[in-house]
Image: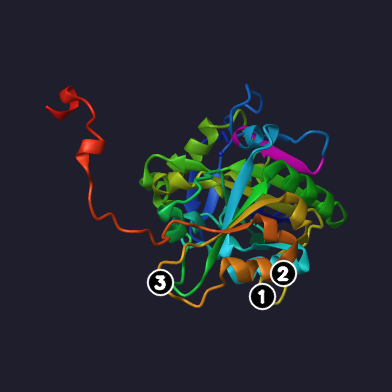
């Protein structure tokens, strides 16, 4: 077995032959596909002049246009990020969707040019391209605890990626950025249907590629039920050939970054009932350097009730009144 490199995902498919699986979710891939073909939208390619960053086509469009992404998280975590000037990656083992973790520890056997590949330790953080000013579905989807106050942080995607690249150079990290692919049929993600899962990845790639990028694509797939998220993942791969990525005591992997230069807006979760949460004014006081970017979501603001409607003021012509 070859030594596996270490991956980290910031919270974002290929082409093979037949596969089989044995106990322990070991994936065996046989040769039989071309290694050269026309590029497809999920192929990873180098990002600009950087040698340590690779982007798939769907995510590249987001970088080329300097668009924004959003990240939902608890308010207290935002304060920590800003205080430490660092973003934190976490292990995919913490993902709530059990389907996303099916292939997390899957070994690749008889992989072209490499024989075997054993997955390394991984950490992850995800973003959404969906920039609704206010979405009840999003606030509810990312809420794991009713008592926890959420924030939606809007960031300049390209500036953030460029900072991450520079911040990780000395750590010898390789960066993979991919827009998540949403499978039409849920059954194609389960381990008993692994052949269909791998074929789907292969059909959306121009070549088999290397084991490292193929593994990244395996972990960039979700079910169609989550397509509304329009998720992008930034994945970091340690090149030091050790399995220990160096998580902190909280099981996180921090990366230094200048938030003030990349944050465009901070939305506080809409307050539906008195909770003792941090108000807009208090948040501006605590996060003084960000105060001009902080706003409370007005989704559940109280409004004056309507007591009457005078149609004579609306239907102004005889034709309208008929």
Q: Position of residue 250 (x, y in %)?
A: 66, 75
Label 2 sits on residue: 247
| Residue 148 in sight from this viewpoint | yes
Name the side, left or right, on which 283 lies relative to 260.
Answer: left
Mark seen at residue 144: none
Location of the N terminus (image quadrant) = bottom right
Q: What element carries label 3?
A: loop
x, y percentage for residue 275? 46, 76
> Are there few (<14), some (14-19), or many (20+) residues within 10 Å of tag 1?
few
Q: Position of residue 289 (x, y in %)?
A: 75, 62
Q: Which of 125 and 152 is in front in this view?
A: 152
Q: Give the range drawn in magenta.
A: 51-58
CA gap between label 1 and label 2 equals 8 Å
Q: In front: 238, or 196?
A: 238
Q: Which residue position holds label 1? A: 250
Tell me the tag on residue 273: 3
Q: Distance between the residues labelled 3 and 1?
A: 31 Å
Q: Is residue 61 left or right of residue 195?
A: right
Give percent across and percent down for residue 309: 23, 46
Q: Separation of disc 3 and disc 2 at Cα?
A: 37 Å
**Residue at point 54% right, 50% down?**
27
- Given contact means CB atoms under 8 Å apart, are the residues at marks 1 and 2 in contact? yes
Q: Is residue 214 visible in this depiction of the protein?
A: no
Say if 316 sits above or below 10 in the image. Answer: above
SS class of the residue under badge 1?
loop
Q: How many labels sit on residues?
A: 3
């Amino acid at each position: 077995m070859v030594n596996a490199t270490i991956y980290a995902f910031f919270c974002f498919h290929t082409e093979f032959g037949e596969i089989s699986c044995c106990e322990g979710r070991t994936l065996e891939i046989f040769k039989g596909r071309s290694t050269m073909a026309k590029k497809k939208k999920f192929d990873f390619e180098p990002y600009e002049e950087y040698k340590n960053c690779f982007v798939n086509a769907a995510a590249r469009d987001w970088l080329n246009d300097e668009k924004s992404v959003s990240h939902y998280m608890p308010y207290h975590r935002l304060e920590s990020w800003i205080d430490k000037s660092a973003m934190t990656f976490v292990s995919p083992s913490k993902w709530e969707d059990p389907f996303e973790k099916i292939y997390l520890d899957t070994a690749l056997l008889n992989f072209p040019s490499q024989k075997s590949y054993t997955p390394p330790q991984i950490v992850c953080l995800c973003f959404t391209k969906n920039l609704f000013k206010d979405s009840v579905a999003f606030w509810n989807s990312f809420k794991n605890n009713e008592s926890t106050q959420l924030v939606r942080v809007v960031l300049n995607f390209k500036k953030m990626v460029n900072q991450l690249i520079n911040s990780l150079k000395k750590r010898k990290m390789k960066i993979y950025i991919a827009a998540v692919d949403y499978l039409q049929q849920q059954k194609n993600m389960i381990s008993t249907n692994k052949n269909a899962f791998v074929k789907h990845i292969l059909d959306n790639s121009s070549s088999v590629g290397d084991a490292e990028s193929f593994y990244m694509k395996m972990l960039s797939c979700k079910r169609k039920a989550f397509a509304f998220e329009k998720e992008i993942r930034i994945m970091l791969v340690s090149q030091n050939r050790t399995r220990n990525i160096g998580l902190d005591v909280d099981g996180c992997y921090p990366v230094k970054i200048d938030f003030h230069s990349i944050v465009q807006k901070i939305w506080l979760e809409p307050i539906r009932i008195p909770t003792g949460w941090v108000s807009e004014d208090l948040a501006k006081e605590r996060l003084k350097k960000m105060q001009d970017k902080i706003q409370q979501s007005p989704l559940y603001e109280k409004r004056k009730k309507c007591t009457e409607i005078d149609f004579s003021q609306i239907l102004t012509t005889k034709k309208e009144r008929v």
